[in-house]
Amino acid sequence: MDIYADIRALVAAEITRLGTAGQLPDALDLSGVQVQAPRDASQGDLATNAALALAKQARMKPRDLAEPLAEALTDHGDIESVDVAGPGFINLRLAEGAWRRCIPAVLDRGIAFGDGDIGAGEAVNVEYVSANPTGPLHVGHVRGAVFGDALAALLAKAGFTVTKEYVINDAGSQITALARSVHLRYREALGEAIGDIPEGLYPGDYLVPVGRAIAGSDGDKWLGVDEAEWLEPFRRRAVVEMMALVREDLATIGIVQDVYFSENQLHLDGRIDEVLAGLEARGLIYIGVLEPPKGKKPDDWEPRPQTLFKASEFGDDVDRPLKKSDGSYTYFAADIAYHFDKYKRGFKRQIDVWGADHGGYVKRMRAAVTAVSEGEADLDVRICQLVRLLRDGEPAKMSKRAGDFVTLRQLVDEVGRDVVRFIMLTRKNDAPLDFDLARVREQSKDNPVFYVQYAHARIRSVMRNAAETFPEVDLSPAGLADADLARLSDSAELDLVKQIARWPRTVEAAALAHEPHRIAFYLHDVAASFHGLWNRGNEDPSLRFIIGEDVVLTSARLALLEAARTVIASGLAILGVEPAEEMR
């Protein structure tokens, strides 16, 4: 049940009926008709733009169209009142019974309530994390990891067929530096004093076990051997070991990706040559000299003839280099091939989750995807801004055993997986986020994790107490669905009912906008409505949930609470957070 969709269908049906009756033009295109919550709740429960959306094709003034439609809508039992406002908006206030019908629907479907079909099974690729495999994941990776994982879950709930992907950047100079760092640790494992790690290599102790493992399996095979002989085997082994570490790190926050894609394989298979040849055949690659950019010069600008991609023809600011001065491909060339590979695998809808330092790369990558797919594929890039670790408002100090950064595991060890995941989604992805290590463990309404978890746990407690108090009452979802919900008439009860009813539309809107933080916001609103109702019950005995005198009313209230708990659990599942059964 989606009350927004139901009312839209009702509006559409009335427009069609009025057209058939000659009161409005017939056969209007209704695709632009929407039903949404008005910005000002005092204006009503829902509003439709039908008159404004149809006025031009109907050749009528919006209010002239709105008046007969509003009059027709007043005849329906689900609609309590209709008001035409402003230039032609139609505000609707629904009957209480229309809202209450969501409760049996929730109890019937469980956490599947809110599952949508707007995705229609369309394949979508969400690529996230994709950190260079040169060490453990750190705090800077956490936000993008959680955002990408929650977005994938959100899209799946909305009906898309989602593939979660990690591209392994195993072809660049950073992997050569990693291999040299591991070789030092290998020599150290065989008893050599290596001294300070040279600048440009990776100093973290996390490479010590890798060096020991190679020493254990290969002995002194690589001692006294030219770098040209040992470098490639060490590159391969180092990437394997680091990706095992990355997978373990991701598992600590509940992330398992479907595909791990090797960038190096693109080079080995000649797929970069292939895609660039295709672009060249279409006249999209040429030799030219770029104008010097204004301000700070980017790394890929050189005052010489270069192989350039006509990115400016597809929305970028300038054309972009595909080869370096030594003749090797730029990272951009490899990225074009990678996204083309995703397109060939059937992903016309692609989403990349990047860090804050990649904002300047967005236009060229979107241009490239448009070019290689000839306009068929769409790339949405989501930039995750920085996270600032605090402790009681001051910059946090944590041990840095891995080198010069705070690891993902350190963060999870200190505050827990569920806290990390929830807090990372309490701000929109492109807004900076403060993560206060002390405050996220406070048991107060100011801590959004606790606030939502406490609502779920408190409802579980109510249901356990109800089972003891009313052993004769069927408290299963099916049993509660038969409760007399007309007894729910208090304004606080109805506020919670309306919050629950908005869950399917919240999922749909958040999925279309690629904004999983909306789910966290929604859960906070549901928890607020529940806690508000609970607190009123403490003040007014007639609103308490476990009361022996009126079992019928109590059953209705328990049905309401179980529905609220269910949508909270459904939302937490999208965020990757376990619902609390009890608070400790």
Image: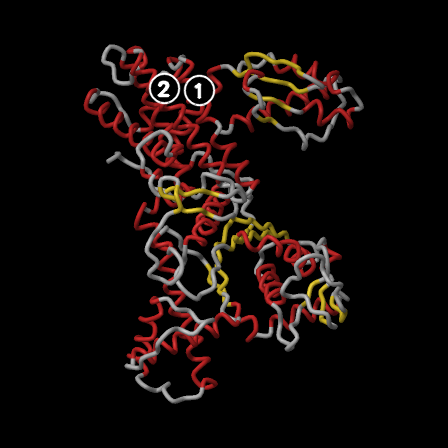
Q: What SS does tag 1 mark?
A: helix
Query: Which quadrant would the C terminus be assigned to in this image?
Result: top left
Task: Find disc 1 in the rendering and name its residue.
Answer: 495
Q: From this view, report whether residue 101 is shown above or below residue 163.
A: above
Closer to us: 202 or 253: 202
Left or right: 581 as drawn, with respect to 130: left
Closer to us: 542 or 69: 542
Task: Find disc 2 in the rendering and name its residue.
Answer: 533
Disc 2 from disc 1: Cα separation: 9 Å
Q: Residue at x 64, y 18 (%)?
A: 90
Q: From this view, report whether residue 367 is shown above or below residue 178.
A: above
Colouring rule applied to residues: secondary structure
Q: Do the residues under discs 2 and 1 have CB atoms within 8 angstroms?
A: yes
Q: Which quarter of the figure has residue 69?
A: top right
Image coordinates of residue 121 in percent, x first then y, are: 54, 47
Q: What SS does tag 2 mark?
A: helix
Q: Residue 207 carries which label?
A: none
Q: Extreme right residue here?
A: 59
Q: Residue at x 38, y 55 (%)?
A: 406
Mark closest to the chain's N terminus, 2 or 1: 1
Q: Give, as a three-letter code, the residue at label 1.
A: Asp
Image coordinates of residue 319 in percent, x first then y, are: 72, 61
For mark 2, does the 10 Å Cα neighbourhood hold few (<14), some (14 to 19), or many (20 or more) residues? many
Left or right: 430 as drawn, with respect to 532: right
For mark 1, does the 10 Å Cα neighbourhood hold few (<14), some (14 to 19), or many (20 or more) residues? some
Image coordinates of residue 442 in percent, x first then y, are: 31, 35
